[in-house]
Image (cartoon, coloured by chain):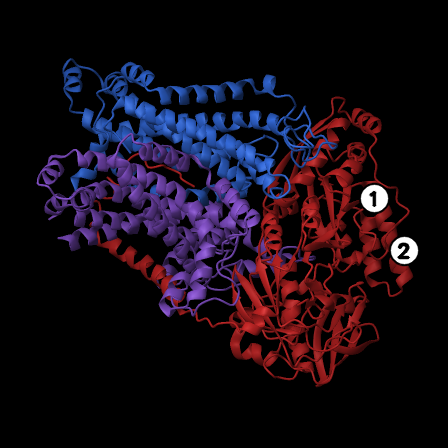
Amino acid sequence: MLARFLGRRLLQLVPVLLGVSLIVFLTMHLTPGDPIEHMLGQAGRVTPEQIAELRSHYGLDRPLATQYWLFLRHAASGDLGISYSHQGRPVAEVVAERLPATLELTLFAFVLALAFAIPAGIFAALRPQGLFDRLGTVGALVGISLPGFWLGIVLMITFGLRLHWLPISGRIDLGLAPRTITGMNLVDAALTGDAPAFWSALRHLILPGITMAAPMAAMVMRMLRSSMIGVLEKEYVQFARAKGLPETEVVGKHALRNALIPTVNIVALQTGLLLSGNMIIETVFQYPGLGKLAVDAIAAADYPLVQAVVLIYATSYVLLNLGADVLHVVLDPTVRTAAT
Amino acid sequence: MPEALTDDQIVETTAATTPGMFAVLLRNRVAVAAGLVVLAFVAVSVLAPWLAPFDPNLQHPDAIRLPPVWQSGGRAEFLLGTDALGRDLLSRILYGAKVSIGLGVMVVLLTMVVGTGLGMIAGYFGGWFDAAMSRLVDVLLAFPFLIFALAIMAATGPNLTALVLALAFKGWVDFYRVARGDVLSARHADYVTAARGVGAGTAHLLLREILPNIVPPIIVLATLRMATIIISEASLSFLGIGVPPSIPAWGTMVSDGRGDIATAWWIATFPGLAILFLVLAVNLLGEGLRDALDPRMRL
Amino acid sequence: MADGQGTRDHRGWTRREFLSAAGRLAALAVLAPASTSVLLSGCARGGKRLSRKLVAGSLSVALDADVETLDPAMHRSRTVEAVVRNICDGLVARDAEMHYVPQLAADWKVEGEDRWVFKLREGVKFHNGDPLTAEDVKFTIDRIIGAIEGLPPSPRKDLLGPVTGAEALDPQTVVIHTDGPYPILHKKLVFQEICPKGYFEKVGPDEFAKKPVGAGPFRLVEWSPGERIVLERFADYYGGSPDIPPVGPARLQGVIFRPLEEAATRIASLEAEEVGVAVNIPADQADGVEALPDAHLSVAQGTRTHFVGMNLTRKPFSSPLVREAMRYAVDPNPIVEKYLLGRARALPGILVPMAFAYDDSLPAPRQDIARARELLRIAGYPDGLRVTLDCEANDKRIAEAIAGSMKAAGVQAEVRVWKKDNLLNQLRRRERDLFLTSWGNSSLDPSGILPVLFRSDGYSNFFGYRNPEVDRLLDEADRAMSVAERRQKYIEVQRQLQRDIPTCFHLALEELYGVSNRVENFAARPDGMLPMHDVSLKS
């Protein structure tokens, strides 16, 4: 029955994407800003005929409804259109160049956040109101309250400029780029066993990764801590303890699995926020990803590109939540029975 | 279906009443302290014209990038130093509180009224309205807020109306969900059935019977949303698409000071700290309120 | 940005069963393939490791804007031009002093009024090995003026003015035809780079925009959009213009251009030695670069004028008295000396002093508060003016300084910031009253700026300025074959503008580059180009 559940959820993607594409289409087209004028930039003497010629070349002279319909029809055949600001290159190609960079940063921040939050949440829950718990609680609150752009700047100054430990921009040192398989440098380097490339890519990811991971780590840690405290009070945990099972096993096997169930949702939600926050982080670190592409595309009134990027954000958001639900079903046997 | 996750259950607790909630809150020392800090920020934002030593936009061509008073080169009249146009940082930070808090309150009130109202209607009547709203909410949740804000602001230029709309674009959804869920479960509660039995009208039921019961969770949510809104506003201002430049705002100040950070660290640092402290205090207050409302409702 | 700290679970809705109609299945089919195609093409990109020699012997340059194409004919961006100019040479080039020198052309002469005959250099090769011939020049010109069917129109067409076509007489001789006399054609050819006809026709415009081939000193090795452009020395380079020694292949192994839009990041990257050259250092951050132990500042006079313009078609600036008051409202001194640290110059008019026909008899700008207030009073504004000063994001600080300075004269200006292109569009539609913007004129010829801004039908006449006398003078200057006559016409235009005051405050900023001390023979240029042919690195 999981398959039926999955199918139904995937189907729900459709109206969401249609709605999202309609909103972005209307927002872009109904606000002033003309991609053709952007293209011409500082052109000296441009005749109205020249502008009309360009407008018709890009189909901008048609009625709005027609333009939207054409966009949908083309998207159906896998054609996301032609980017205005990238001189007529296909949008899919422009996006595909940036997608791996953003995926890499997001995944890295994701791993970083969980690698920090899960142990921290467990330790804090083991001794509520202990020193570690108090420190962790305060740290988590600070993490949630920090404006990302400011944290990024502070990290850049401290570790990049003052201490010279880490690079402050870019993705990898020149000439070290690994053979492209996925486009994600870290993954490609690992797959090809390219150690120098791996370290270089890792060093470049640390500062933007920490900046991005901070709020997520904080949220996840808090969630895990409180659900863990709740679980540890439950009878079956007390029972396992009474049976004389070692504490690591009690916590690691019985308690953690149950404490993770509510945490999964927070992780999905926060990962969605990671993605929507990447525009600011990528701007601060001049990281060549999707977020920066979106910011530039909006400035250039590059409608097809903006539409494509928004659809990618929306799709990943919906899929993340779907993933969380599937995980939920897998983790929680009671839900599984209910679902079937 | 994994029922454990529906709205109806997240907002299961409407037992605590508003006055009771504040009584419990007063016993939480951290929350009280945080509340005092928030009050202090509010006071500053109101009293900025009297507290600030200078007009926040007054430029001193002979006092450009002065360090704070405790560093060599600092001058006593500019306690926290000056920026690249010779404007007094302290005055700008004091005035900046006005924008952060003012906008935060405005957006939270707007989203709270809209979201709660729509949520109550959807929860109470259900039907096509509820169905249509849930489609809209799904779409909005999946829509990247920042892109919407960028597109609107790129078209209109930084202005407060567009900024409020951009911030409120998705903000009402949280209130909507809470209100809807609460109303849904309250619809068949005894006190509502009883009121209906004595012939109370729909408006009376919604406003006089149900609304008071969903106020506490709404207040908690409003406080926590406030913290988010302040960061969002600062981020938009940082990107240059938030508050107009003639109004001092913390996000703008951080952005202005970015280029100078190697030579004049104070310009971007102090407004950043101001954001951090205010948001931290608001978050702590929100948590205190939530614990007071219901210690089980954790996150 | 956390736009919902997720105080609650938010997915109760999506769980609802609201989908059953088969029509929606069809809609899924609409969007699913689109996202899949994105993912698949992401995997298709191939990459290869750059050689150690290239990496070690390369200079990294931090650009201030991203590059969206590398097709010399399909952009209006100075950044693209600066990069492409290293890959493709043109018929004519400029040396560091902005003198015009033949580059791919050996020489040229004008026959009659409308025929320019260019002799090409012998033995010039494109990076793919093809020889450069007159056919390539003809193809280049024809493509830009839109004479080739089936290609997208070039946004650089207007830069060739009245050029009507080109013809190849023999492999080394090409004729360019103009509609009537066009005395400055050779100056305009600086902005066009020659593309290989054969290669272009083989790969098509899309591929060419990604992997252009030229006859310049460097060939393209790798372009990761948004990240970097890697160029490698072209060993078979013909040597470049003999008027710009040294002649021969480039001295650097390669050049890496990196787009770092934020000035703060460019400076930080220079400090961290991640780049050797950082372009466009804002004047008020120049001290930060000068303070670096391993880098210095390279300075050139700019060819771009920042100016405060006014909308003459509506109140309050339709009044000449108000416009005159504006001229006396701003104090250039603190702006130039304090805020811009002396790295700018306040000008009486729109032309920079280096430009042809610059009128040096115009009075220097100065503030006169009493006079400004008096003029405003006569104009009917006894309590002063309240206006909005619109500008683009990069000019925010200057705009704020100008607004601060005008307060004393009774002008309360509120600064409003826009994205560059957005502001430009509004200005063209004359929707703004008072604005700070800038216009680059790297040709340094008044024809590149005066008709565009001030002719009644000028494409960028933001002011709604109309003066038939100015139109006539500009037309006459365009066709005047004598240098003295042209100069005289342009000087008269400048004086008329001084009387009509469509613009009230002018500023020429220096072009500032941060340069690592390892870099030799690099100097900032007024035109913003980055020729890397002669540059080398200290080992």
Q: Is residue C39 placed above or below A243 in the rendered structure?
A: below
Q: Which chain did the image draw in red? A: C
Q: Measured from the top left, where is residue A151 in percent x and y?
A: 48, 41
Q: Chain of mark 1?
A: C
Hue of chain A? purple
Q: Is residue B112 visible?
A: no
Q: Residue at x 80, y 59 (%)?
A: C445
Q: Nearer the viewer, residue C134 or A154?
A: A154
Horizontally, residue B287 falls left or right of residue C411, namely: left
Name the residue at 22% across, 17% down. Answer: B201
Query: Where's residue C454, x and y in %?
Result: 76, 49
User: Badge 2, how many Cα within 10 Å: few under 14, some, many 20+?
Assistant: some
The kind of residue on which mark 1 rests is: Pro
Tell me the shade of chain B.
blue
For mark 1, what is the residue?
C348
Kindly identify which residue carries mark 2: C488
Q: Quadrant of the C terminus of chain B?
A: top left
Q: Residue at coordinates 71% horizontally, 51% vertically from top-left?
A: C439
User: Which is nearer the N-term, disc 2 or disc 1?
Assistant: 1
Q: Picture quarter containing residue C484? A: bottom right
Label 2, secondary structure: give it: helix
| Chain of the residue under the numbered disc 2 shown in the image | C
